[in-house]
Image (cartoon, grey):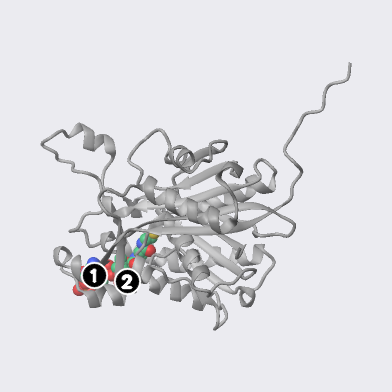
Amino acid sequence: MSKPTLTAPAPARYSRLLGVGGSRGERIVPNDDIVGPIDSSDEWIQQRTGIQTRRYANEDTTVADMSVAAAKDALKNAGITADQVGAVVLGTVTWWVQTPSLAAIVADRIGATAAAAYDISAACAGYAYGVAQAEGLVRAGVVDHALVIGVEKMSEFIDPTDRSISFILGDGAGAAVIGPSDTPGFGPAVWGADGSKAQVISQTHSWSDFRRSGPDADHSWPTLRQEGPTVFKWATFEMTKVAKKAIEAAGLTPEQIDVFVPHQANVRIIDHMVKYLALRDDVVVGKDIVDTGNTSAASIPLALERLIREGQAKSGDIALQIGFGAGLAYAAQVVIVP
Ligand SMILES: CC(C)(COP(=O)(O)OP(=O)(O)OC[C@H]1O[C@@H](n2cnc3c(N)ncnc32)[C@H](O)[C@@H]1OP(=O)(O)O)[C@@H](O)C(=O)NCCC(=O)NCCS
């Protein structure tokens, strides 16, 4: 008797972004509100980072709440219902529960009950990693529609007296729906990680130290630290090269990029990249950081959501996105604006 033929995922096809959405922390926190404990000033922060205000979520607003809001917004903009979603891929480093995943909880809350759901830990590259995975799942026919979410409540991961990174960070969630397409909606992802530099952005100590130290804590709640100038150099030089490779991998030249949506780490890093990539003078550049702050995994989808909402990025535009941060993890990819 002949063997039966397997039912397998559909043959490879293209995938594209169908819609993006976002949700920012409710509170607008100006520099003047945080400079006291770090002996800084509004002027210094604006000059060195471009940040004027950041957004913090209310105490009782959770990463799940922000994810649900961003996901619903993205689904609405994509014209897709939650029951059509086959996978929810969520990037975060501020879900304080080891298991279950935040993705599973969010999938249930939005009604994506048929979806596979899992979290990924790639810090500020979390959304870009998620897109690289999800568009591959759609392209391979594993799922028809995937939802990618980047979410952080960084305000719970900061030390108000820390001068290295805390003053940069903010809270929010961004989401994107990816579906099948007749034409290519993504160039190849150029991604990787360099664990030899893991110490340059990391939490102060591990959760097990926190647990073991008991009520007379030597170790308080862990917070985030960075070696700012080292990260700055790595981002400006190494990440510019990665972005260039992503443009080349998509068969394009820098002049063909209409929209640039880098991780919102520092306006000076963004400006450097625009210059050294030799992007066009009229390229549209995401600078959501100025009033949202650095929201880690949420920063790219929030910046893109805003550019689309404000009419600066138009459907069909060719956009370059690049996420980078702790790990040190990074991912760059050319994407077509939905
Ligand atoms: C953090 C960052 C803004 C600091 O800016 P910088 O220009 O590198 O600052 P430096 O650490 O070299 O310090 C320069 C001066 O400012 C002072 N300074 C440092 N942090 C300060 C702060 N928060 N407020 C005020 N002054 C500060 C330093 O003491 C130093 O003073 P000195 O010249 O008298 O010695 C910058 O390094 C940065 O953006 N790094 C990358 C951030 C990033 O991308 N992180 C996220 C990756 S996901």
Q: Residues within 10 Å of mark 2 (few under 14, many from 20)?
A: many
Q: Earlier in the sequence, mark 2 or mark 1?
A: 1
Is 70 situated above or below 281? above
**Residue 82, placed above or below residue 282:** above
Q: What percent of the width, then of the height, locates residue 278?
A: 56, 78
Please identify the residue farthest to the right as the structure is shown.
1
Secondary element type, mark 2 = loop
State left or right for residue 263 relative to residue 137.
Answer: left
The quarter of the picture showing ligand 1: bottom left
The residue that appears at 58% across and 44% down in the rendered structure is 85
Q: Name the amino acid, label 2.
A: Ile
Question: What SS does tag 1 mark?
Answer: helix
Q: Which amino acid does label 1 sit on?
A: Asn
Q: Residue at x 41, y 33 (%)?
A: 100
In the image, which disc is placed on residue 51? 2
> In which quadrant of the rendered image does the N terminus lie?
top right
Residue 327 can be seen in this image: no
Question: Which quadrant is the C terminus positioned in?
Answer: bottom right
Residue 195: which disc?
none
**Marker count (numbered):** 2
Q: In this view, does 228 lie above or below 43?
A: above
Separation (CA) of disc 2 from disc 1: 8 Å
Q: In this view, does 279 lie to the left or right of 102?
A: right
Residue 31: numbered disc: 1
Contact check, label 2 and label 1, Cβ < 8 Å? yes
